[in-house]
Image (cartoon, helix red, strand yellow):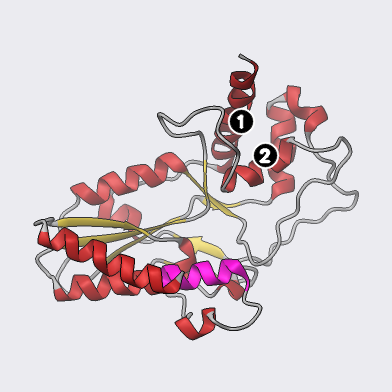
């Protein structure tokens, strides 16, 4: 994964330069701002922070797949900025979204297999009756961002003015943080037809607050992006997409 990330990133960027491309927007991940071991630490991270992982870190025995993924992503982003510094006539932006949720994209089939972050959402409404609501756990940060916000930031990046000399346009895009029991409780109230399908919140459940938070410093100042969609709309849209998928299968 690491080798393909480095070589693939270099290859795409060089092809873009040879084709005369003058604006490049690269999709990274919020995981580029911190070490995955810090996802459940009471810390705050912003666009200015960096994940310190190296190739050697990713090669360590028993490294979690997510940590290998974040290592590959941050190593790939470092390659992007090396390219940008060597090609100052090309305007480069990296967008670092949180875990992306929301409806299917245009043209995507409503009968596609559930995968990616949809798998987490599906776990809220599918399963045996009386099961326990999924609980967030390390190394996965309990953050979210609506897919439409991520798309809007990419478009804004293509339209924005070049970065000031000596600076990089590196934009974190995290809507906020929320835990699955909270999402489940909201769905039961906002969509009563789902109440019998949702898991049970354990008696005496107490939400953890010891997880990392994120500050989007540059989405507004660079692109005029004022606010991100809240978690209620984000997960409501995702669940509605899954329900529409169900109906599509019936027809």
Which residue is label 1 attached to?
A: 242
Q: Residue at x 75, y 27 (%)?
A: 194
**Nearest the eye: 75 or 30:** 75
Looking at the magenta stretch, what is its main secondary structure? Answer: helix
Residue drawn at (54%, 81%) of the image: 59
What is the CA distance from the residue labelled 2 to the residue labelled 1? 7 Å
Question: Are discs 2 and 1 less than 8 Å apart at CB?
Answer: yes
Residue 126 lies in magenta, yes or no? no
With 207 as the anchor, is 204 left or right in this view?
Answer: right
Q: Indicate the position of residue 159 as horizontal and vertical percent values.
A: 19, 47
- For disc 1, the neighbor class at 10 Å (few under 14, some 14 to 19, many from 20) is many
When asked about the image quadrant of residue 92, the answer is bottom left
Q: Please identify the quadrant where the C terminus is shown.
A: top right
Region of the chain picked out in magenta, as a range: 64-74
In x, y percent, where is residue 96?
40, 59
Residue most extreme to the top: 251
Q: Position of residue 44 (x, y in %)?
A: 53, 69
Q: Is residue 159 above or below residue 197?
A: below
Residue under label 2, please give it: 122
Residue 70 belongs to the span the image colors magenta? yes
Q: Is residue 54 visible?
A: no
Query: Quick check: 162 left or right of 132?
Result: left
Task: Please determine whether, in this image, residue 21 is positioned above or below residue 114.
Answer: below
Horizontal side, residue 102 vs residue 23: left or right? right
> Residue 161: x percent and y percent?
15, 55
Secondary structure beneath label 2: helix
Q: Is residue 101 visible?
A: yes
């Amino acid at each position: 994964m690491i080798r393909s990330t480095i070589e693939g990133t270099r290859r795409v960027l060089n092809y873009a330069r040879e084709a005369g491309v003058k604006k490049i927007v690269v999709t990274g991940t919020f995981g580029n701002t911190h070490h995955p071991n810090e996802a459940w630490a009471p810390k705050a991270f912003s666009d200015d922070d960096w994940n310190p992982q190296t190739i050697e870190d990713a090669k360590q025995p028993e490294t979690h797949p997510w940590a290998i993924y974040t290592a590959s992503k941050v190593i790939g982003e470092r390659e992007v900025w090396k390219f940008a510094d060597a090609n100052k006539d090309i305007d480069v932006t990296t967008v670092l979204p949180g875990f992306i949720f929301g409806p299917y994209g245009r043209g995507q089939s409503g009968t596609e297999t559930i995968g990616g972050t949809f798998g987490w959402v599906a776990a809220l409404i599918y399963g045996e009756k009386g099961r326990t609501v999924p609980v967030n756990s390390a190394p996965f940060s309990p953050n979210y961002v609506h897919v439409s916000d991520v798309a809007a930031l990419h478009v804004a990046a293509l339209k924005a003015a070049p970065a000031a000399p000596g600076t990089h346009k590196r934009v974190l895009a995290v809507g906020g943080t929320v835990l699955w029991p909270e999402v489940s409780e909201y769905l039961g109230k906002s969509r009563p037809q789902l109440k019998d399908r949702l898991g049970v919140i354990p008696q005496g459940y107490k939400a953890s607050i010891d997880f990392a938070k994120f500050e989007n410093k540059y989405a507004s100042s660079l692109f005029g992006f004022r606010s991100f969609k809240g978690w209620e709309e984000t997960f409501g849209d995702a669940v509605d997409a899954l329900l529409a998928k169900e109906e599509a299968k019936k027809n």
